Image (cartoon, grey):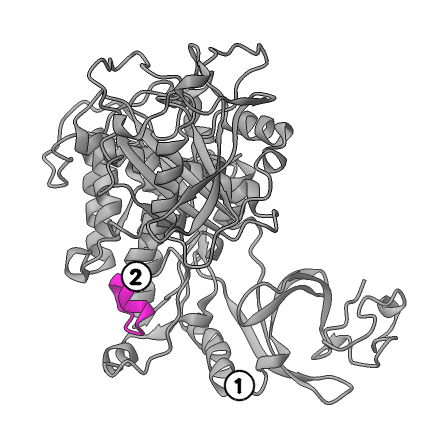
Amino acid sequence: MSLCINPICPQPNHPDNDENRFCQSCGSQLELLGRYRVLRLLSDKTGFSKVYEAYQQDTPKILKILKEELANDSKAVSLFQQEVEVLGQLKHPGIPQAEEYFTYQTRAGLTLHCMVMEKIEGPNLEQWLKQQQNRPISESQAIAWLKQLAEILLLVHNQQYLHRDIKPSNIMIRPDGQLVLIDFGTAREITKTYIANNGSMTSISSSGYSPREQMNGQALPQSDFFALGRTFVFLLTGCQPAQLYDAHLDILNWRHLANHVSPYLLNFIDWLMANELNKRPENAREILDKLTELENIYTGSNVATVNIVGGLKTEIVTPTTTTKNTIKPPEKQPEKLPLLALFTALICSLLLLWTVALANRNNKFTVVPADYGQAPVKKGQVDYFPYEEGKDSQGKVAEFNIAVLSVEYKWQLGSTFQIKHNDEIINLEALKTRLEAEGIQRIMENPSEIISVGTASCEGDVNTEQSRALERSKQIQLLAKQLFSNTSSVQGYRLLNLGQFQRKDCQANQDSTAYQRSIIIIGVKKQDEGVILDEALRDRLEKKPFADFKLEDYSLGAADKFKTIPSNL
């Protein structure tokens, strides 16, 4: 099959194109430069170009074409041509080889900017992790891949270039395990970057992977190191960094999702992506030296590297000697979560499906006396409390409902992502499937906003538990966003952190109320214009509490502490 690359061709895949030199639909040349035939479109999702698979006789190639709407944009054309120039100067198996640049004119007179490149066989790391069911990579795999990429960056930076767009989708893996850094269209000479102190440099960024200085147009070698660190957050957790970022505290909450690796590697990754430039590595050589040191901590230099399908794997050999190290572990190591081996593979592919619990099918339920508050309506396995009005200090109103996603499923003590059902930790994907089967969208009755409620038990100190409650509310909200993304009535999401349960009779391993550790969401609708939502919600929960749930039992339930947080999700 021969595909026509004319962007306005009415039938680019005309069935008779194979046997002809010219497109049988629009008349444009099919054999580019007399030697390249285009087979199929691979991607048109990138910002600058379309990517095709082409052939020179029987040899597969990659054809990149600047998008037609950018053909007359001098800056876009310059970036496109720059990629050819950069790749021509960088010779390494971890960098694709650019073969030639040319312009192509369609039958209608449209000029397209084209580049032919070596075709890398294999997936990118985002695709690869998906193929692995989003199972995070091991520590040994991370070290092996970090070394490969640091060596590539050493070459790139020594040639006075920055990449500026390192992320999993821009790293491919060959069948022999060699990683390949692709998409040098955003690369820039370091000298030009240093000169651009007036902020006139083109800002190139990828959400979750680019540091602040780069988003402000001031990329440096350390900007590539930041993106490298964020890439390994994704590989070690399966989660996109943007999903883990806490804008209120300006931190990336990722370490608790990578408890299968050592604190030394956790610190190493944090070093790469420190917010402050002067706290990141000075150069790629320093990264390589630290990686060698990191290996020696555990192996006494006894590291066996073998090729496996899908990439290099470094097997860590039991050390026979100890080696002095300067990579310090944290003063307090993260809490080890139970059943880690079983759930590491599930944690982050299911981040957007996080931490909602739905009761099992045995219909057990402890009936709460009606005089405790609003009685629940059973909606399958969901305890539902219908809309009730709340009023703010101005007399304006809004209506709120509550859904408790069953008394049978509760937060695992000390966890922000595990749900306990009797003595079992529930598969989060199954929970999400069951919740959809229950019809939670229908149950919530067309809310305009969803509020995710975070609570914590009395097992720890108040500050720790309030932080845990906030994290739980975020995880519920991530799932709510997934579940209600196609519900047209839902226009916004909020967090409500109620903090630690503090009733005097509280025991860490026992619940004093029906919903003390339950997963709870609140729906909002019929809001008066200008209503103070927090005041109206608190009024509803005080005057018409649901079951035995009382705000006074929680550390952040008082009027001066009760606050919802609008979400940027």
In this view, the residue in front, 214 or 175, is: 214
Residue on which disc 1 sits: 73
Determine the secondary structure under disc 2: loop
Contact between marks 1 and 2 (CB within 8 A): the answer is: no
In this view, the residue in front, 531 or 286, is: 531
Residue shown at the point (41%, 24%) measured from the top left: 518
**Residue 154 highlighted magenta (yes or no):** no
In this view, 169 is above or below 343: below
In this view, 166 is above or below 548: below
Q: Is residue 450 visible?
A: yes
- Mark closer to the chain start, 1 or 2: 1
Residue on which disc 2 sits: 211
Residue shown at the point (46%, 71%) measured from the top left: 185
Determine the secondary structure under disc 1: loop
Which quadrant holds residue 186? bottom left
Residue shown at the point (44%, 10%) measured from the top left: 422
Query: What residue occupies the far front of the structure in this picture?
Result: 395
Q: Position of residue 562 (x, y in %)?
A: 28, 41
In the rendered picture of this protein, how many numbered marks are placed on residues? 2
Specify few, some or many for label 1: CA neighbours under 10 Å numbering under 14, 14-19, or 20 or more: few
Q: Which residues are magenta?
A: 212-223
Amino acid beneath label 1: Asp
Amino acid beneath label 2: Pro
Residue shown at the point (46%, 10%) measured from the top left: 366
